[in-house]
Image: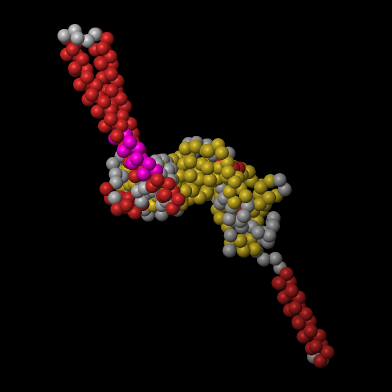
Amino acid sequence: MSIFVRRVIIWGLLVLAATLGIAYAMWPRPVPVDLMAIERGSLTVSIDEEGETRIREVYEVNTPVTGRVLRVEREAGDEVVADFTVIAQLQPIDPEFLDLRTEAEMRASLEASRAGRDLAEAAVSRARAELSFAETDLERIRQLANTETVSQRRLDEARLAHDTKKAELATAEATLNIRIHELERAETQLISPVELIRQRDSCACIPLYAPVNGKVLRILKKSEGVLPAGTVIAEVGDPRDLEIIVDLLSADAVRVEPGLRVLIDEWGGDAPLNGRVKRVEPFGFTKVSALGIEEQRVNVVVQLTDSVDAYGKLAHGFRVEAAIVLWEGDDILTLPLTALFRSGDDWAVFVVEDGVAVRRTVQRGHANGLEVEIVGGLSEGDTVVVHPGNRVDDGMAVVAR
């Protein structure tokens, strides 16, 4: 065999091998995908949102009048009994310090009150003397009248003078009492705060009692101090009387009705709790989300239906996860939501038949964030592509990943 023929054979073999390699590389291979067989099961459609527990009735213990509140000895969590447990004690406030001018005016007023008292005492002494003289004169004229030495008119005049002097004495004594009290008032205005601080332990206190049975939720004013009327000192409530507040987007709140079942999870217990929607509040409010977006929110009140023992560790202001159940179904065909894609105006899935992905239009029903109800287009046992992606197309060979 010549060298030329030998070279042709070698180059021919090389070209054939390259052609076969390119053909093998370009030959279509099955696309690896995730597959699942459709089965019947249950589906729950719910609105999931964070909620917060609250005691249905929280009572505030506040100061009825302005006064000095002694240091509160109660602590948050203490058991209280209505109208028996003392939450705090209220004392009268101390007077203010007087400046020099005001103190001088008060002392002058005190001296004037003392002079008025002395004047009233002198008036009483004079009235008593005149009354004594009138009594003696009346007795003398009465004796003369018995012997008809004086006229009846003279006797009546003596009686009138006696009664007049008696009334004047009563007036003078009343005036003396007024002056004495004015003196006491003037002396009281000069009492210094230092003197009252020494007498504070003997002052009567106003006890502030717990309004209901339950526990102290929190103490707002712990230390001793002067508080104005209406200042809240503590909050009291019954932790067993709990409800849950869930704030929903207004678009979700219109789908919620009283009586819907609610599942409460992520509250720290071993099992979810059960509840019912009690009411949807008719007032919305604006809330800024974590992304800085203003949202219209509506509060939904959820009533717990489990026994108190089931949620006994929950208290006021605890965070929970609430799922408000809008629809529930059993023995239905369900698919992961990721298996569906849009085909024009319809929904479709890829059904695997003999290793080939076939596009099939389906009719979907209820859906949540993970699964969807299939009401037409598929049968139990059909195998579908769970995550079709962009690599899968109609008629393409596929293989399980």
Residue 226, position as x, y percentages in the image = 40, 50
Q: Is residue 116 magenta?
A: yes
Seen from the viewer's position, the closer of residues 14 and 295 is: 295
Q: Residue at x 61, y 56 (%)?
A: 291
Residue 139 picture quarter: top left
Residue 228, position as x, y percentages in the image = 43, 46
Residue 396, position as x, y percentages in the image = 68, 59
Residue 80 picture quarter: top left
Quarter of the image with the N terminus is bottom right
Judged from this view, the residue extending furthest toward the front is 149
| 338 versus 186 height, above or below | below
The image's colour scheme reads: secondary structure
Q: Residue at x 30, y 50 (%)?
A: 200
| 138 versus 114 height, above or below | above
Quarter of the image with the C terminus is bottom right
Residue 18 horizontal side relative to residue 349, left or right: right
| 385 versus 162 height, above or below | below
Residue 391 picture quarter: bottom right
Q: Residue at x 24, y 21 (%)?
A: 134
Magenta span of residues: 109-121
Judged from this view, the residue extending furthest toward the right is 4
Query: Is residue 199 something one can see in this rendering?
Result: yes
Q: How many marks?
A: 0
Residue 281 horizontal side relative to residue 129, left or right: right
Residue 54, position as x, y percentages in the image = 43, 45
Q: Is residue 181 magenta?
A: no
Seen from the viewer's position, the closer of residues 359 and 5 is: 359
Query: Is residue 42 something one can see in this rendering?
Result: no
Q: Main secondary structure of the magenta part?
A: helix
